[in-house]
Image: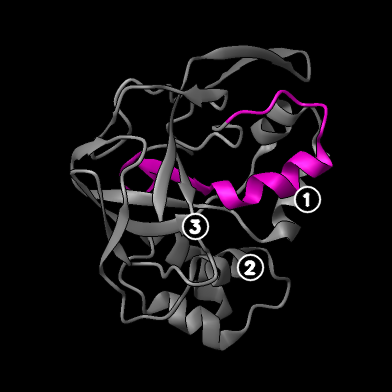
Amino acid sequence: MKVISTNIGLAKTFLWNGIEEKTGIYKKPVAAALSLKTNDVLNDTVIDRLHHAGRNKACYLFSSDNYAYWKNLYPDLEWNWGMFGENLTIEGLDEYSIRIGDIYKIGTALVQISQPREPCYKLGVRFGTQKILRQFILHNRPGTYVRILQEGEVKTGDEVVLVEQSKNTLTVQQFYELIFAKDKPKELVALLMANAAVPQNKKDSFKKHL
């Protein structure tokens, strides 16, 4: 895997149900390296810290491999890396093989896979239609958040190197599908609950399905 683009967003104002809101989802490529901090990416815009940034969502990674699919669905948009609000656009990122808890070296930073990205209405604002939320869920390629184990700098062209693979086999894709599944397989729920890297608030939400 390799970093294709480093992306930063500025605050953008929009109207939602007649109320003025702001978002940092409009990210664009930058030439400078990104500084990955414990709770966020330095100089990035985070409006809603209840649902974004923090230890378990410090940086968002999305695969460049998925862009062709979405460009075909939305050919009239002005496309560039960062369209999904990702800080790092990664070539070769595969949610079906990456495990929750895997540890990677990216640039001088050490990161751990923590949880898949769940789409909210601001992704719909970015794409000009809320129908993308359902499409995003069904496509099953959500990208992933990481927690920062060692702060560091990441630049375009940096390799994403696996340092330690989680012994727990729960993948990003399985976690994501489990979130939205009406009937949640108990064996997958048990796998999630046994994974030390799954955020506690997520484990709490799945307890009733054991």
Query: Looking at the picture, does residue 30 appear above or below residue 187?
Result: above
Q: Residue 81 is drawn in which quadrant?
A: top right
In magenta, the rendered stretch is: 54-80
User: Distance from label 2 to label 3 (Cα)?
Assistant: 20 Å
Task: Judge the density around disc 1: few (<14), some (14-19), many (≥20) Cα neighbours within 10 Å.
Answer: few
Viewer-nearest of labels 2 and 3?
3
Residue for badge 1: 134
Residue for badge 2: 177
First in sequence, mark 2 or 1: give its number: 1
Q: Residue 50 is drawn in which quadrant?
A: top left
Task: Judge the density around disc 2: few (<14), some (14-19), many (≥20) Cα neighbours within 10 Å.
Answer: some
Query: Looking at the picture, does residue 120 appear above or below residue 9?
Result: below
- Scheme by which the image is coloured: one colour
Residue for badge 3: 92
Query: Looking at the picture, does residue 208 appear above or below residue 72?
Result: below
Mark 1 secondary-structure assignment: helix
Residue at the spot 75% in from the left edge and 39% down from the top edge? 71
Identify which amino acid the numbered label 1 is placed on.
Answer: Arg
In this rendering, position of residue 12 left or right of residue 132? left
Q: Quadrant of the N terminus?
A: bottom left
First in sequence, mark 2 or 3: give its number: 3
Task: Farthest residue to the front: give it.
Answer: 157
Q: Position of residue 98 (x, y in %)?
A: 44, 68
In this rendering, position of residue 108 left or right of residue 112? left
